[in-house]
Structures are given as C-alpha cells and as structure tokens.
Image (tube, rainbow, N blue to C red):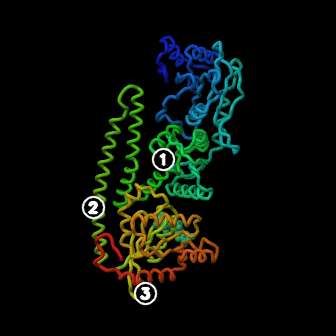
Amino acid sequence: MRVEGNTSGLKASHVRRLEHLGRRSIPPDRLVTHELARELTELAREIRRVVGVLIDRRGAVTHVMCGGHRGLTMPDWGRMRAGPGRLRGLRCVHTRFAGAEALSQDDLTDLAKLRLDAMATIAVEEDGLPGLVHVAALRPANGDGAGIQYLPPTPASRFDLPFLDWIRGLEDELSRTRRPRAVAGADRALLVVVTAGRSRVETDASTDELRELARSANVEVVDVLVQNRTQPDPRTLIGSGKLQDLAIRCFQSDVDLVIFDDDLSGTQARNLTEALDLRVIDRTQLILDIFAQRATSRDGKLQVELAQLKYTLPRLAQQDSSLSRLGAGVGGRGPGETKLEMDRRRVRDRVTRLERELRQLGERREQRRARRGRRGAPVLSIVGYTNAGKSTLLRALTRTEVFVADKMFATLDPASRRLRFPREREVIVTDTVGFIRDLPETLVAAFRATLEELREADVFLHVVDASSETLEQRMAAVRAVLAEMGLRDRPEVLVFNKLDQLPPGESRRLAAEYGAVAVSALQRIGFERLLERAEAELFESNLRPAAPAEAFGEGERSFS
Ligand SMILES: Nc1nc2c(ncn2[C@@H]2O[C@H](COP(=O)(O)OP(=O)(O)OP(=O)(O)O)[C@@H](O)[C@H]2O)c(=O)[nH]1
Ligand SMILES: [Mg+2]
C-alpha cells in the first residue's frame, strides 16, 4: 500500500514497516488494539514523525499516513464523498508526541470535514510504548450546540470500547435527529453571514435577503451561521475556529452546499470547498443561479451565460497560479496547467462570441424601439427592488397577464404593455428585471442590454415594498443603479406598494413622508392617485415636450 504523506529521508526498512501497516487488520469490534497501537508508537518514536492509519468498519487498515513531527495531512479524498447524512465508515488513529495537544484543531476539523467515525490519538511514551488514547467523535445536533463528543482518555492497555455497538448507536441517533428533506431533490443549504462591523439590524436584513434568494433558487435553508468579525480572513473569510464549527454544523444538518453572503475570492472559494468537502458558493453565484433558472428568452439566456463566464474567468486565473505553485512543490510543471490555460482561452472566446451576439440582438431591439418611438407613445417604466411587486402592478394597471411570483427575480425579461389614459392618451408601460443591493458588477454589465430599455423611459414608476424594513436601503440601491446609467434625473413617481401589509393609515403616513403614492397592486387600491401622478409627470410637465418622435432611435434621450 502506498504511504500517504512525506516519507522522504526515511530508511527503506522504515518505509517497509509503514507499508506493512497497510496490510494489518484488527477485530472489527475494536477501535484499536493494543498491538496495533504499539506498532504505531514504536515506529513513530524511531522515525520521529507522526504515524497514522485509517481503519474501516471491518477492521482493515485502508490508508497509512506519515506526517511531520507535529501532525498529519489526510489523504486527498477527491470525489470520494461520504453519502449524505452518513459517516464515512472510516476512523483515524494516529500517534501524538509529548507536548502536542491530545486532539488538535486539525484533528477535529478533519473529523468533521471527512465525517470520520472517530478520531483517536495515542500518546507516544518515552520508551516508545503507547500511552493514553484520546477519542473524539461527531455527535448529532441535540440543542446544546456541542458538535463533538470526547471519550474519557484511557491507557492503550485498557482501551476496550465495543466499537461496532458504539458506532451503530451513534448512527441511529444521527438518523433520528435528521429532518427529512422538505422538497425532494432540492438542495439543502447552510448560510454564512459575516457581520463585518455592521449593525445587528443590517446583518439581519442581509440574512433575510439571502434566505429569500436561496428560497427563490429552490434551495432549502436549514441553518444560518453568523460570524462577528470585522476583518475577513483573506484565506477563508471566516476564522479557523468558525470554520471547524461550520464543518460540524454542515455534518449535523446534512447540507449539500454552503452559501456565503459575502463575495468570495477564488482562493477563498477553493480553500473553503477543500476545507468543508462540500459545494461552496457566494451570493453572486446564487443570484446567477436564479437568473439561469429563470432565463427564457434568447437574450436572457445569453446574458446569464455571459455573466456566469465573466464571474468564472478571474477565478480560473487564480486557480491556475495556485495550482502551478502546488505543482512546483512536487517538482514539475503545474498539474492541469495546460488544461486550465485551454479552459481560459475557451471561456474568453465564448465571452467574445456572446458579446457579439448580444450586441446584434441589442441593435435589433433598438430598431424595434425606434419604430415604437415614432408612433409617439410615451413610456412609463416600472423599476424597483426585486420582489417589490412591479409585475403585479403592470398586470393590475394594464389588466393583462404577466408572470408574478413570490420569488426574487421572478422577472428577467422585459415586458411592455399598452395603457390607455383618459382623453385617449396612450402610454407604454414596461416592466423589467428587479434590482438588488450590491448588484455584482458582472451582472450589471451582462444585463446592460436589458437595462438599456430603461433609457427610453419618460417617467419611472419606482415601486417600493412599503412593508420592507429596509425600504430606504432598497430605494437607495435602485437609485444607485439608475444613477450609474445616467438616468437619475428622469422624473420618478415613487410608489409605495403592499399597503395592505401595513396597519391602516401607516402606509399613507409613510408615503407622505417620502412623497410617494401608497397602493396595493394586489388589491388594486390607490390606482387613481397613482395614475393622476403619472399622467401629470408624463403630459403636464412643461419641462419636456410629450414624446418627440425624432428623439427616439438614437438610444439616449435627453430632456434638457
Ligand atoms: N400583499 C401584497 N403582496 C403583493 C402586492 N403586490 C405584489 N405582491 C406580491 O409580491 C410578490 C412579488 O410580486 P412581483 O410582482 O412578482 O414582484 P416583482 O417586483 O415583479 O419581482 P421581480 O420580478 O422578482 O423583481 C408576489 O408574491 C406578489 O403577489 C401587494 O400590493 N400586496
Ligand atoms: Mg417581476
């Protein structure tokens, strides 16, 4: 059997003895036998390195590991994942020199991340004999928060835990405390939010929003981990103690993936994936996933793909350099370097192609817009934070069918409908993709084509969910995107929606405070006032002529 880890500099006889360990097996009912313990400690003392084995449930040694003086590195598991919700069926037993912790942080992290049956360390006495055995194992979530159990330290000579009974008891307990999946086939996720010096209210709002996003992506959120930390760790974002905590909670909650509220660098994403042995994504990726699930039109699909590629590209580059560094360690060119180089080139080519295709689609749309413009109908564009009720309002105002859902980013493709005002005046009302705070730059860029539609707006109907606790931040996020597009000076009618969700009178008070019109798009309340305001902005403002036909078609319209 190949010995994992570092065997360089060892005598051939020692390497042979290590290899020999790989052919050992012990009675399945024992966690470790005194003989095996002794073999490990004697060898460890002679070579002055930590020696360890992995043992399966039949008692056979499946891996032999040789570390440095302080600790071991577990073999690379690759895709050899434990089945969901189950222990891996392997336990780790390794030696420990005097002065080292009985069970180190790394031991506990490996225990959690690899879902080992148990992690046992055996003290190496001065004479090379085995001393105290320390054992840690994972435990089910049972309310007290402790994710690890420790057995009483016992001298190797008297260590006689009935291992199989014990591990079966633990597995039974684990399956009892696991909730069944709410939605068959849906991913279960754990969310991680770092406070980063924000107030409790702000952190809560972020957490709620991330939950909503997860729900909109058909992901079931089973747990949320909040870390109070102002300085993010450049390697893993969260600190190492929290990371271990996270690994244990992932195990206990039986999750498929972990979603970080913060954007992760390529390095962080990779380190976290490695440390947790689970899929790890950040908020941007989650939003991209939602977009990908929603995209139906040709434009929409192309834009999402473009955004995804642009998101991946810098991460591929980072991966590349770290892999090369790794490769240098084993004396050669980085493994996979050529492949990554190729991947990167392919991605870049695809990006170029997508951009070209989107540009063409954009030009065609521009022509359509120009035709519509010449017919002279002014445009009322509904904008607002995602899930504010924009599509509901469009549907209610124009009495047409528009897709509405209690999900973030329900709408991806723009829609326009005609609306007849009194005196036979007709306007076009448009609805588009919702905005969100910290909209990732790649996404804004990719959706530029869709957002371009907003340029033809004569007036914005800025829809706000009045029942949101963070309505100010949401309004600011929407206005920031408009400002970035140079559209902040277009007239805006502020619409406070969902008034039915607030106590009577409250929404009107709130609306008055912000100079908004209070409505319920769902219950069709407040439309009269809304239409009056819109009409006034559209037709009665003497700042602008009503829809000068020749101004359309060139993209930008100005009303100076
Ligand atoms: N109670 C209440 N719910 C509303 C009202 N207007 C919309 N909703 C609900 O809010 C949710 C989102 O509505 P949408 O119209 O899809 O919102 P949107 O702004 O188009 O959202 P995106 O397209 O995802 O950006 C749906 O569940 C609607 O039924 C309202 O006046 N009152
Ligand atoms: Mg919508």
Q: Looking at mark 3, is its residue's CB closer than 8 Å to ligand 1?
A: no
- Residue 358 percent across, percent down from the top left: 31, 59
Task: Give x and y (percent) for residue 300.
Answer: 37, 60
Between disc 2 and disc 3, whose residue precedes?
A: 2
> Mark 2–mark 3 contact, CB under 8 Å?
no
In the displayed orientation, state which residue is furthest to the bottom: 423
Q: In this figure, which residue is indicated by the disc labeled 3?
A: 422
Q: Residue at x 39, y 46 (%)?
A: 314
Q: Name the secondary structure under disc 1.
A: loop
Residue nearest the observer in this picture, 523 or 209: 209
Q: Indicate the amino acid at tag 1.
A: Leu
- Examine the rendered structure and indicate whether residue 408 appears above or below residue 249: below
Residue 444 vertical position relative to residue 459 in the rendered view, above or below = above
Tell how many labels: 3
Q: Circle 2 is placed at which residue position?
A: 360
Q: Name the residue under label 1.
A: 264
Image quadrant where residue 448 sits: bottom left
Please name which of the two marks, 1 or 3, marks the residue nearer to the observer.
1
Q: Which residue is drawn at 36% across and 27% down?
A: 332
Q: What residue type is labelled 2?
A: Gln
Q: In which quarter of the image is the C terminus?
A: bottom left
Q: In this view, does 160 lie to the left or right of 26?
A: right
Amino acid beneath label 3? Pro
Q: Which of marks 2 and 1 is in front?
A: 1
Between 169 and 8, the one nearer to me in the picture: 8
Q: Give the CA distance from mark 2 to mark 3.
A: 38 Å
Distance between the alpha carbons at the discs numbered 1 and 3: 52 Å
Q: Is residue 170 visible?
A: yes
Please, which residue is most extreme toward the top here? 13
Residue 398: % across, % down: 44, 77
Q: How crowded is mark 1: few (under 14 residues within 10 Å), some or many (20 or more)?
A: many
SS for callout 3: loop
